Image (spheres, rainbow, N blue to C red):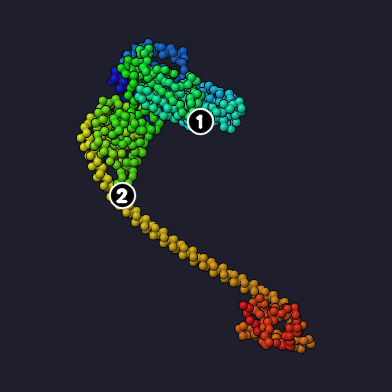
Amino acid sequence: MASESGDSNMDREMILADFQACTGIDNIAEAITLLELNNWDLVAAINGVIPQENGILQGDFTSEASQATMYGPPSHAEAAEAAARSAGPPPSSSSSSSSPPSSSTSAFCPISPSTRHIVERQPRMIHFRVEYRQRSVELVLEESSKVGEIKAILQTELGIPVSKMHLKGWKSGDVSDSTVLRSLHLPKNNSLYVLTPDIAPTASTSKNSALQDSLNQNFLLVISHREAQRDYSLNFPGSKTIQEVKRNISDLTNIPVRHQQWEGWPASASDDSMTLALSGISYPCHHLSVCRRSSPANAQEPTEECTDVHMISDSEGDDFEDASEFGVDDSEMFGMSSTTCRKSPMMPENSENEADALLYFTAEFSSRYGETHPMFYVGSLEAASQEAFYGKARDRKLLAIYLHNDDSVLSNVFCSQMMCADSIVSYLSQNFITWAWDVTKEANKARLLTMCTRHFGSVVTQTIRTYKTDQFPLLLIVMGKRTSNEVLNVIQGNTTVDELMMRLMGAMEIFTAQQQEDIKDEDEREARETVKREQDEAYRLSLEADRKKREAQEREEAELVRLQQMKKEQEEEKEAIRLSLEQALPPEPGEESGEQISKLRIRTPSGEFLERRFLGSCKLQVLFDFVASKGFPFEEFKILTTFPRRNITQLDPGSTLLEAKLFPQETLFLEAKE
């Protein structure tokens, strides 16, 4: 029985790998969900994600039955055909209980026309329950529909314009109206809710508005696991359903939903499809407790831990899979186990965050084997690789990947005697970055293989696949190289402390030799880069000095040009004034004129003399204009008499030469004003 279950798990692992390769879906949890919806029928699952134009490939009767289960009851013709096929030889009891569907195995061999035929594809229907304030709308649409069609129906049902409607609750985040439902890979049943922030609630709908706000609130659930005597503090949004909470607790406690027995849910939480916001739990914190439900044989004598039960969880239709899928044997499923409390898993299944999974792994490892153990790196495998391989050469370390499997009889011995030995713990802490993962669950193992393929290549992934369960746990020693990462050693669980230490030291010797070369290369490279930086800095400073010198020279030249231009403009202005004054002067009177004439002789600062005759009746302004027309403006020079010394420019320009006593002749001289 155990060997058949192992073969089934191996087949499902291969189906999962082939399904991801065909569809390109990297999310393992999403891939497993799609395969479970199709009863692990590879062809049906692939056709559900990548539909053909005219039909889908089908296998034997088992595949058609699973297809009918997904898309609805078969037609009369299909039922007759299925009945005719079922009249053939019945399968043996062993194959019917543990072997996977035949259509799944056909994916790994050529499909002959005799065993496949084309049937008309029935559209897959998706159910939606949409909540808006105190109203709830049930919708059923084909997976080929678009999100906008849901909003159009809700506009009719709720009377809300599509432009003011925000449809929330999608697991993949906000989606556009043009998104096809098939591309979201939705399960059969879905819960959504509508937000209308632009529509103010009336007085009668104030409670609805508060409920709508509570969908966006985060609820802290403090859940006590009685058998393990452990509390979990988990944050959930108000849009999370009770069923989703129970499934998450199933991952943490290893208690299937159908075996969970709860205490603390309010009386209003009667439906597992109800959201936390509508369930009536306390905000912001609510306390619950869970334990494994007693078997039917012991139902009349419940244990102390599970008395005073408020709610017993019953799984939905898609939760009643074979017990082997949950890692539960037949005796435990039907209450014939000698204990009601199973050992907690080392790591929850399908954890969204690798760091959270490693925190859980570290805590569980400490609770099992004590606080003396290697310091496990909390983060993704990519982050651990970056920490170990991509720092400075002197700071690099080897990466030790510890792979745990609870199903191996060697796990407890290896962890308690090897991994917790003081010498091993000290050596790993000083020289290694230690990263751990639990491969007990198939989903976690498939996730690990995907990570290893991404970071180390398919050879390492295939190497891990070849190890059987009883060869675990494994310790992979990985060294970072220039072009790729290299696995130096794979240490199996059947070893001793001395042998483990020798193999770790051997790997360390190889790493040290490589590290010394890397340090030398890095020092030489840094020296070259330092010289180059200094040269670049000197060149930059030289360019900066040249630039400043050039800019200063350009400023001086520009200032000189400006001054020359200003001087030129001033001289031109003076010349224009001089010419205008010269033209405005009255004509010089002749010597034979009958009027009184004054003959003036003016000495310039350069020693030259200016001589001119003026009428005695001329104003002093005419004298000033004559002097200015010769280049000696009134504003810059003053006119003085010799004896007695008088400043003529201080006299009234309107007075005559006679009045100024400059008649019949006079010698004057020019002097610059101070």
Query: Helix, strand or loop at disc 2?
Result: helix
Q: Which residue is mark 2?
A: 522
Residue 668 position (above or below residue 584): below
Classify the position of the N terminus by image quarter: top left
Query: Helix, strand or loop at disc 1?
Result: loop
Give the residue displayed 27% in from the left and 28% down from the top: 411
Q: Quadrant of residue 473?
A: top left
Residue 609 position (above or below residue 554): below
Looking at the image, residue 436 sits to the left or right of residue 547; the answer is: left
Q: Which residue is most to the top?
A: 87
Looking at the image, residue 362 sits to the left or right of residue 638; the answer is: left
Asked whether disc 2 touches disc 1, contact meaning CB atoms under 8 Å apart, the reply is no
Q: Which sits in the foreground, 564 or 72?
A: 564
Q: Quadrant of residue 503?
A: top left
Looking at the rendered image, the disc whose residue lies closer to the viewer, 2 or 1, is 1
Classify the position of the C terminus by image quarter: bottom right
Q: Is residue 330 visible?
A: no
Q: Which residue is most to the right?
A: 594
Q: Is residue 303 visible?
A: yes
Separation of disc 2 and disc 1 at Cα?
52 Å
Q: What amino acid type is highlighted by mark number 2?
A: Glu
Give the residue displayed 23% in from the left and 42% down from the top: 509
Looking at the image, residue 68 sits to the left or right of residue 561; the answer is: left
Of labels 2 and 1, earlier in sequence is 1
Give the residue displayed 34% in from the left and 12% down from the top: 89
Q: Which mark is residue 216?
A: 1
